[in-house]
Image: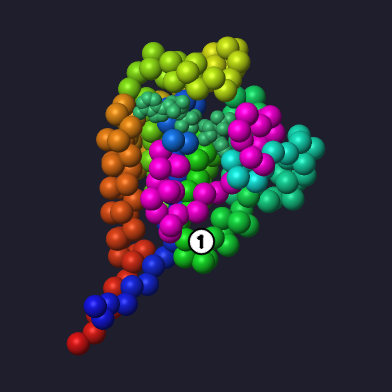
Amino acid sequence: MAVNTQRTGMLLIISGPSGTGKGTLVKKLMDSDPSLRFSCSVTTRAPRVGEVDGVDYHFITDEEYARLVADNRFLEHATVHDHHYGTLRKPVEDMMQQGHNVVLDIDTQGAISVMENAEDYVSVFILPPSFKELRERLVNRKTDAPDVIERRLNNARGEVQQAHRYQYSIVNDDLEVAYAQLKTIVEAEKLRTNRCKHTITD
Ligand code: ADP
Ligand code: 5GP
């Protein structure tokens, strides 16, 4: 087929309460799509069992975080559930310039800041089917102490009130259904004419 396709990278913002399934959905998406690159955030929270520095997060100290803020190195940063998190500007810009689609798994404060400043993005909010189910997922995940789970559940109420600010929202009840919906959004958004220019020949 004599079709030449030129693509421009997409900035995909994914948010939702802790335990709603963002990480699970993002992993499935990344495994299925080599055009995607995950933006590895920095955080001052402690690594969970199984988390790898430089893969899940860059785990840093409060002092290192303060230095990055002072040096204006963040695309966005926020304090979430009592810890600091941030997206480094440079790696995201580099990946976008290389034409990759970059995935940000960030909280609502960070997402709103990116949406207010970025020219082009795709934003998706992931809802749990209920707060009861959210609690069960956090408990069953076995990564957080009971007081941490309570804090995250309390914050979830405010976070879901921000869902209307996003372009898309998905309820992650059946994982395969939610994944198919996310995949559909990504595939459609890749075909927007500002991100995908097809040239055909005789
Ligand atoms: P988040 O990244 O939003 O904090 P996770 O991806 O870690 O959430 O998911 C939280 C827990 O819920 C995990 O144990 C995960 O396996 C589970 N989970 C994710 N999606 C579903 C779903 N649709 N149904 C049931 N459990 C789910
Ligand atoms: P967790 O501690 O469960 O990995 O993440 C807690 C929350 O922090 C989630 O809502 C997640 O999306 C958010 N988060 C992770 N990285 C970043 C980041 O770089 N910036 C912002 N603003 N939030 C982040």
Judge by depth and name the residue closer to the eye, 49 or 68: 49
Relative vertical location of residue 138 with respect to residue 63 in this rendering, above or below: above
Q: Is residue 109 left or right of residue 188?
A: right
In this rendered view, identify the residue nearer to me: 125 or 178.
Answer: 178
Q: Is residue 186 above or below residue 156?
A: below
- The percent coordinates of residue 119 (x first, y second) are 45, 56
Q: Is 46 within the magenta? A: yes
Callout 1, which amino acid? Answer: Met
Q: Quadrant of ligand 1?
A: top left
Q: For residue 8: magenta?
A: no
Residue plotted at (52% across, 66% down)? 97
The segment highlighted magenta reads 25-53
Residue 147: name its quadrant.
top right
Badge 1 density bin: few <14, some 14–19, many ≥20, Cα 10 Å: some
Report which residue position mark 1 lands on: 96
**Quadrant (top left/top right/bottom left/bottom right) for the N terminus:** bottom left
Q: Is residue 33 left or right of residue 114?
A: left
Evaluate whether residue 168 shows in this view: no
Residue depicted at 38% across the width and 33% down the height: 126
The x and y percentages for residue 194 are 35, 65
Location of residue 136 by image quarter = top left
Residue 55 is left or right of residue 72, and the answer is left
Residue 171 location (% of width, % of height): 32, 30
